[in-house]
Image (tube, helix red, strand yellow):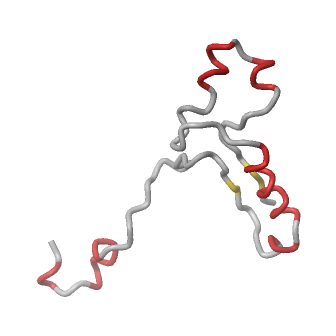
Amino acid sequence: MSGVAPGPIWTPLIPASYPPEKTEKHGTNAPMGRPGQPDEVAPCYIFLASQDASYMSGQILHPDGGTVVNGYRRQPMTAVRFRANLPDELES
């Protein structure tokens, strides 16, 4: 089973549920600096319901404005990641 875990998304429930000062700040802490829109999240659900996702299982899609969900920011592929395969003069 797969799913969608959206970040801050702007819906009519936001201003109906929160005071104006909190509504004004909704989503500003996302890396993109704004809340997402429902039409930016909907494709995730459509994808998982489609035949295109038939080979996916146990995956969670995170349309969240760029937040790193697992708390680990992946490093770019560099020689450091393959340290065991480096010649001795390159090892530090």
Count of picture labels: 0
Q: Residue furthest left?
A: 89
Q: What residue appears at the point 43 percent right and 54 percent down from the top-left corner?
A: 73
Q: Nearer the viewer, residue 54 or 31?
A: 31
* 87, above or below 12, in the image: below
Q: Residue at x 28, y 80 (%)?
A: 84
Image quadrant where one finds the C terminus = bottom left
Question: At which x and y percent is residue 19?
Answer: 70, 12
- Image quarter of the N terminus: bottom right
Which residue does the image show at 32% across and 73% down from the upper left?
78
Q: Classify 12 as above or below 22.
A: below
**How far from the left and from the top, in percent, is residue 68?**
52, 49
The residue closer to the viewer here, 47 or 83, is 47
Looking at the picture, how far across and down is residue 44, in whole percent? 77, 57
Most foreground residue, 31 or 53: 31
Q: Position of residue 38 (x, y in %)?
A: 78, 43
Indicate left or right for 22 with 83 as reference.
right
Residue under the point 78% across and 75% down: 55
